[in-house]
Structures are given as structure tokens and as C-alpha cells.
Amino acid sequence: MRTINQQDLPSGVGMSCDAGGISRSSGDPAREVLNSQPALESRTGGGLNTSHRLLRQFRSRILIRAAVDNPFGNIIAREVGAQWCGGYLLGTRRLSRKLAVRVPAGFKLRRFRKGDERELSRIHHAAFHITHPPREYLEWATNPNCRTTLAVLQGETVGFLTAERRHDGTYGDFNIAVEPKFHRRGLGSALMERGLNDLIEMGCETAVADYWLQNAKVQALNRKYGFRTVRAYNYYETEATR
């Protein structure tokens, strides 16, 4: 994933070139745009021409992010022929006291061990239909700012959560995935409780969650644990240029 230089774009507009990488802060290919620095406000009125010029520089698929309260950003996306491909929500939750971790009967939680990266890759693909190689999960899970917890049933890994402290030290986020056939068993809640506790132990004061608007299960889980939506984005997609 490469992020196009945003200082040439109008405020609230983000653009990303999909190079097939994984965003280490989320595991989601759209996330790196969300974390990139905000664009400076355009004072020249040439934002649309600038966007066309930037798009011509790349031959791969382009994702365009536009805040829902920025009409100009959404106009740019439509004018360059991008198609809406989903909404993205950003939520936050203050961290204070640690939570009791309630593990469903028959399941166990354990820490990541080398070799588990293959299972993380498999489960993430099963849950979100996004493929990333195990080596990228290994790099992420073993980062000093990360803690990864696996949910296990009779020796089989069926879910995981990686909690990560951001570079500023006060914010933390996480990537959670549970194999679909084990949904509605309480595993998401158990992993969330352990993950939020990990963020507290790493010194984070605020947890950040970002997720697709269309993912009702993740929305429900985040609401259950007190995440409040603070920002919403539209995502648009262009075809690869030849």
C-alpha cells in the first residue's frame, strides 16, 4: 500500500495506491489512508485538476477517501470516475480500568508463537476475504509495540486479536478476526476484553477502532465496548490504468 502525497489535495480527501501490502496498524488495505496525515486546505481551486494529474501517475487501482462532511472531496471522486465501494467509520474509547476477560466454555486464549502467522493469515482471509502472506502477520505480531492473542479450540486456532500501541504512545488500535463458523460464540468479546487490557498495560489512554460501515457485526461489538463514532468516510475506487 502506497499513499499518494496528500498536501496537493483538498482538505478531507485522501488517496491511496493499492500495491498489495498490509497496513501494520490494522491489517486492512484501506486503513493506511485513514492513518495518513490530513491534507492541507486547497486555496487555489485547482483540486480537481490536481487529482486528475495524480491519478494519471499510477497504473494500479486507486482508493479515494472523502470525509462525509466534505462535499468537495466526494465531488472529486465522482468527477474522476471513481465508484463508491463502501463507507468507513472511525471510533474511539477512553481506556481506564481493566476488564474481566470472559472466555467461552471449551475455548482458551494464548499468546502468539512463531508459526501462528499462517493461521492468522488463514483466519483473516476467511473473515474478510482479504489475502495477505503469513510473513506480514509475523512481522506485525512480533513488533515490540504489539501484543497478539489467539483463541483456540482443542488446539485449533479460530480467532485472534493484535493490539498495537501507536507511536505517540497514548493511542492504540487493534485488528480482530474470528473464523465465521465460530461467530456468535462470545469469542469476539473475549478477544476484545484481552486486547483492551493489553492496550492499558502498554500505557495507551485511548483505543481507536476503524471498520467498514457494511460490517454490522463489528459495529455491534464496538458499540458493546463503548466505542463512539467520531468520523465517517466514503471510499471510492478506480480501475487500474493501462
Image (cartoon, rainbow, N blue to C red):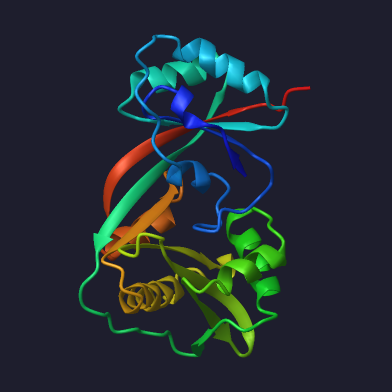
Q: Position of residue 5 (x, y in %)?
A: 53, 31
Q: Position of residue 142 (x, y in %)?
A: 58, 75
Please state, as top left, top right, bottom left or bottom right, where the C terminus lies in the image. top right
Q: Is residue 83 visible?
A: yes
Judged left or right of residue 110, residue 1 is right
Please state, as top left, top right, bottom left or bottom right, where the N terminus lies in the image. top right
Q: Residue at x 37, y 27 (%)?
A: 40
Q: Is residue 19 above or below residue 113?
A: above
In this view, the residue in front, 4 or 192, is: 4
Q: Position of residue 131 (x, y in %)?
A: 69, 55
Judged left or right of residue 113, residue 87 is left
Q: Residue at x 47, y 23 (%)?
A: 8
Judged left or right of residue 76, residue 232 is left
When asked about the image quadrant of residue 46, the answer is: top left
Q: Is residue 185 visible?
A: no
When asked about the image quadrant of residue 119, the answer is: bottom right
Q: Residue at x 35, y 19 (%)?
A: 71
Q: How many marks?
A: 0
In this view, the residue in front, 69 or 44, is: 44
Q: Position of residue 58 (x, y in %)?
A: 68, 27
Q: Is residue 103 above or below residue 42?
A: below
Q: Residue at x 50, y 88 (%)?
A: 108
In this view, the residue in front, 107 or 31, is: 31
In this view, the residue in front, 144 or 67, is: 144
